[in-house]
Image: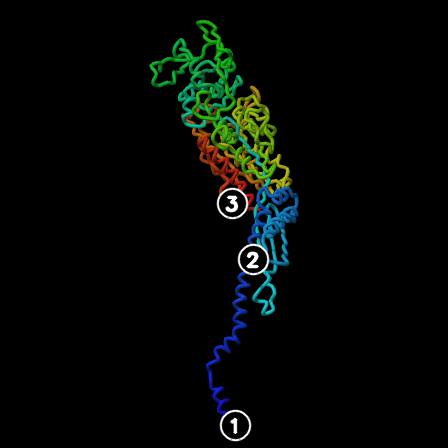
Amino acid sequence: MRALLRLIQRFARDRRGNMAITFGICSVPLLTAVGAGVDYSLATRMKAKLQSAADAAAVASISQKSPGFLAASAMQTDGSVAVAVADANNVFNGIMNTITGYTNLQVTSVVTKTGIRINSSVTFSAQVPTTFMRIAGFTALTVNGVSSAGGSLPPYLDFYVTLDVSGSMGLPSTTDEAVRLQNLSPDNYRQYPTGCTLACHFSQQNGPCTDSGTQGYPTNGYCLGYAISRVSPSGFKSLRIAQSPAGQYPYKDPDTNSPTWNTYLKLPTGIVSGLPNSLYAPKLPAGPTSGLTGGGLTAVSSCPTAGTDNCIQLRLDAVGFALNATTAANGVDGMLALAQKRAVVANQFRIGLYPFITALYSTYSPLTSTINGSSTTPGTINYNAANLATLLDTNTNSNLGSGGTHIDVGLKGVNDLITSVGNGSTSTSRQPYVFLVTDGAQDPQQKGVPNGGWSGSNHAVTLDNASNTYPSICTTMKNRGIIVSVLYIPYQTINPVNTSFANNEDTYANNNIANIPTSLRNCSSPPDAAGSYFYTANTPQDITDSLKAMFNHALVTAHITN
């Protein structure tokens, strides 16, 4: 008995097998934990694949040109976009159909349109079978997630390009072009011996260029500045002959380095009697004393490039080029070409051209979504843009009126055309933008068309002057929700000033220049996150760049505010 007790005591004191026993006891939870890590890793990798599929589905369902995006763009109300929901589900399932290792997959896609915002959400849930965790009774791990994407639908915008085509917008587009015109124009030469550059002079008789001693040589009572700008400067120069007696009309050869600088020149009597059309008539000699009866010159309706010998570019030529320039034709993009490139859906942008002098020519080129016509095809907005200079005040167009610059009347006319103001979210809720292009010199006077009398003051004021017919028109438009963007093409100082001309018109015009920028800035809509709505352009390139910037600003603002 004692021997048995000792053996039992020895066995109890012996610790040499405990490690094995302990390991055996612990191995079950240890192996379970390691297996759980493996199973969890597999589940994590599967969730990443599901998440990637959901991301792709959410983005694809609202990407530009996708069925859902186009469907949402055409919706006239907010709500679910069924086509986009189906597209999201198809993309998700198409990706996951090539992947195995999951069961009980559930996917829910939601795509909604709110204003010009479109949002997509793809939620998923699936089970990933386990291997090691089955020991602990877990046959599968559930993974779930969600992916969201959002974007902007194309805003539907209307652009009312309101164009000042009054006299001062007929100034040459650059300093060099001004010199070329000064060297040729006889208009009011005795009053402006440095050369007249206002190439908008009335073509009708009884205008300011009647032969009452103000011209540099006889012109049959017609102003020639505009006509000269439409033909070859060298061709026009070649028509002139030395006059006799010398000095009767003090117009000299413009080539200051020429030995004939003191030679006084004029057009042949035969051409003078038929001006201005005789400039373009066939070049037929009429005799040794009267000279030619026709100039044989070719007139252009637009002058897209400064410095060429077929025309002298005017400001409105530059504006027309900035609107209508295309990469294929001219190496640059104008606003119409830019709008074509930026359009995402049909009829997204409508653009109209609305010129004014003393009245708004509302039917010249009304709103249209067809902005990709030919600049040589009459009736297209592209043609009308290219030929803006033909609208300059020559006292012949009753649609525009004549004699002054009534910016407020032009804007009032445009405001009346805009019958509804939307937020751009649908094709029936379009956001209107008014692009005012002007030098900002309001001139209250008027002249009857054609050959009518003068009325009203010719002393220049600003757009917001209390004496105007509609001094608060900009505020009225902005209060309606119309966005007003202004392109200021600075009015040029008249030099020399002739205080005796037209009741000292020059002095009033010059004194008014300093007040113009503030008045136009106040007319424009307040700056927003995309910048100021007031632009200034001094050169043809500035005009092109500014019009494109104004258009891009409208797109950015539409996305920010919606």
Within-10-Å neighbours for mark 2: few <14, some 14–19, many 20+: many
Query: Which numbered mark, 1 or 3, is in the foreground of this view?
Result: 1
Q: What residue type is labelled 1?
A: Met
Query: Which numbered mark, 3 or 2, is in the foreground of this view?
Result: 2
Within-10-Å neighbours for mark 3: few <14, some 14–19, many 20+: few
Q: Name the residue under label 2.
A: 46
**Marks 3 and 2, how far apart in space?**
46 Å
Q: Which of 258 and 454 is in front in this view?
A: 258
Residue 423 percent across, percent down from the top left: 60, 43
Query: Which numbered mark, 1 or 2, is in the foreground of this view?
Result: 1
Q: Is residue 37 above or below residue 344?
A: below
Q: Can residue 113 be seen in this view?
A: no
Q: What element carries label 2?
A: helix
Q: In this view, does 438 lie above or below 186?
A: below
Q: What residue type is labelled 2?
A: Met
Q: Nearer the viewer, residue 376 or 461?
A: 376
**Marks 1 and 2, how far apart in space?**
67 Å
Q: Is 498 left or right of 149, judged from the image as shown?
A: left
Q: Name the residue under label 1.
A: 1
Q: Residue at x 64, y 41 (%)?
A: 74
Q: Do the residues labelled 1 and 3 touch (CB within 8 Å)?
A: no
Q: Name the residue under label 3.
A: 528
Q: Is mark 1 on a helix, strand or loop?
A: loop
Within-10-Å neighbours for mark 1: few <14, some 14–19, many 20+: few
Q: In this view, does 331 lie above or below 128?
A: above
Q: Reading the chain from its start, which is encountered first: label 3 or label 2? A: 2
Q: Do the residues labelled 3 and 2 touch (CB within 8 Å)?
A: no
Q: Which amino acid does label 3 sit on?
A: Asp
